[in-house]
Image (cartoon, grey):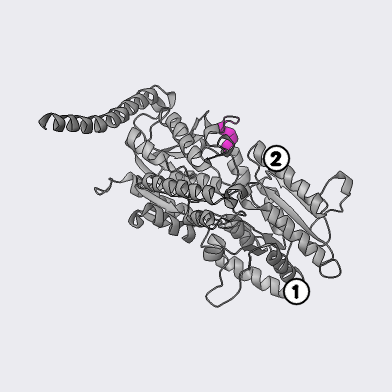
Amino acid sequence: MPVLGLLVLACIVLLLAVPLFLILWLKLTAYRLAARSGLSKALAGKETVAFFHPYANAGGGGERVLWCCLRSVQQNHPGVACVVYTGDVDVTAADLLESARQRFGVAINASGVHFVFLTRRHWVEASSWPRFTLLGQSLGSLILGWEAVCQFQPDIFVDSMGYAFTLPLFRLLSSCRVGCYVHYPTISTDMLEQVRGRRSDAVCNDAMVARSNMLSAAKLLYYKAFAALYGLAGKSADVVLVNSSWTRGHIDALWAMPDRTCTVYPPCDTAALAALALDRAAKDFSGKLVLSLAQFRPEKNHALQLRSFARYKNQTKSGGSAAVRLILAGGCRDAADRRRVQGLQKLCGELGLREEGPETEGDWDVSFRTNVPLKEMQTLLSQADIGLHTMRDEHFGISVVEFMAAGAVVIAHNSAGPAMDIVTPLSDGRRTGFLANDDEDYALKLREALDETSTAERLEIAKAAREAVRHRFSQEAFEESIAQRLIAPLRGPRDKDL
């Protein structure tokens, strides 16, 4: 019996010792490698905050968050040097800063920010994981995070793009303070319900799985296991910022640490957009403009926009607005996004919509504009009569705020951020926009907004919408919150309970 007891004790010690030894070995290896880097030597003795943002040059709302975070640190914590981990190896630091200035109007002091270019970004791309994508991308983020921690170890680490599994990695291997800004939970209770309900129209659930009881049960088990791991990863954060009431609800459910979590709405340049006239600017065509601003990603559901617009056009052939055109403008990150645009162009033809091109000679229904610069985007916003948004369960919806600030009447998806935080009536009951659910509903709302609402009524909606968003979602409000609610707490001593 004593021998058996000793064997059991030895096994327990071994089970505990192996992972502890592995962590210690990884920690020492990462430290030695990082200490050799030129950046570590250049910033020796300086307090540093590093932002993990593999797609810093993507040009979407998440990237505006990154650049405004950097500006907030530079303006409110001038003694702190900034570092950005990015996978944009095809551009230079100067290119990234110029892109931020052109796309977002955010000027960053180049001497106060340093970039670590990561070469293994393909590990976090969805195309690398056709199956078990959530788990694969999370494992990929650990590979990419390992590359990052071996190149530079900051005093403060902030995941600003949603790679939660990098939080425990940096906390364990770099012993730094850890925070994050959550745009969208990697997994949510809504996703679990979509699989449980066998919804084939959901982005996260393909038709083959939805048709099978066994596959649906297996996927549900996989999602539950992943949700548990995601919750453990999130708990390693010292400070958590979330971008909306919807995201807050899911993060509270999964990470269960409301005392370390607060809501900070993402930044929008509402001041510049609110300076635009409410009366719509002249266009290079007669008629009205419906504008979409969204990166060409599957969850943005551009196909719903095209189907809704085609339905509206078919319904109004015998009446209504004589000429209404749709422009889809957004960021195109990679080859997959470019193929997605090509698929949407093909769908235009199938729906009988004429795409803008040399052969149309100005007679077109739909135009695709990729990676448009800030000036062109502001011009489009000044011209747009309607702002169209179709993503289901959009975490927040910066484009919706931009439409409302610029004076376009918004038609947004009736879910999550737009429905809970943005397109809500004012305290006096004034309407700030429209909400819709499917292509039929969107077509009806397009008809109501374009053909059944007078110019004076549209102007009143636009005024109320601008009033609702101008200060609440401004860049100034965001940057102040970042300084006070993220950086300041992370610069202080760690809570003893963590």
Q: Is residue 93 magenta?
A: yes
Q: Residue at x 53, y 47 (%)?
A: 215
119 vs 202, nearest the viewer: 202
Q: Is residue 112 left or right of residue 459?
A: left
Give the x, y percent position of residue 142: 44, 35
Q: Note whether 306 is above or below 455 in the view shown.
A: above
Mark with earlier residue (1, 2): 2
10 Å crowding of disc 2: few (<14), some (14-19), many (20+): few
Please give the residue where the numbered disc 2 appears in the rendered image: 339
Q: Quadrant of the N terminus?
A: top left
User: In the rendered image of this protein, does residue 69 appear above or below residue 408?
Assistant: above
| Secondary element at tag 1 | loop
Q: Which residue is mark 1?
A: 452
Q: As shown in the figure, which amino acid type bears the numbered disc 1?
A: Glu
Q: Looking at numbered disc 2 in the image, what kind of residue is underneath it?
A: Arg
The x, y position of residue 479, in whole percent, is 47, 52
The magenta segment is 87-97
Q: Residue furthest left?
A: 2
For the point 35% across and 44% down, the residue is 236
Query: Measuring 46% from the left and 46% from the top, which residue is drawn there?
Result: 222
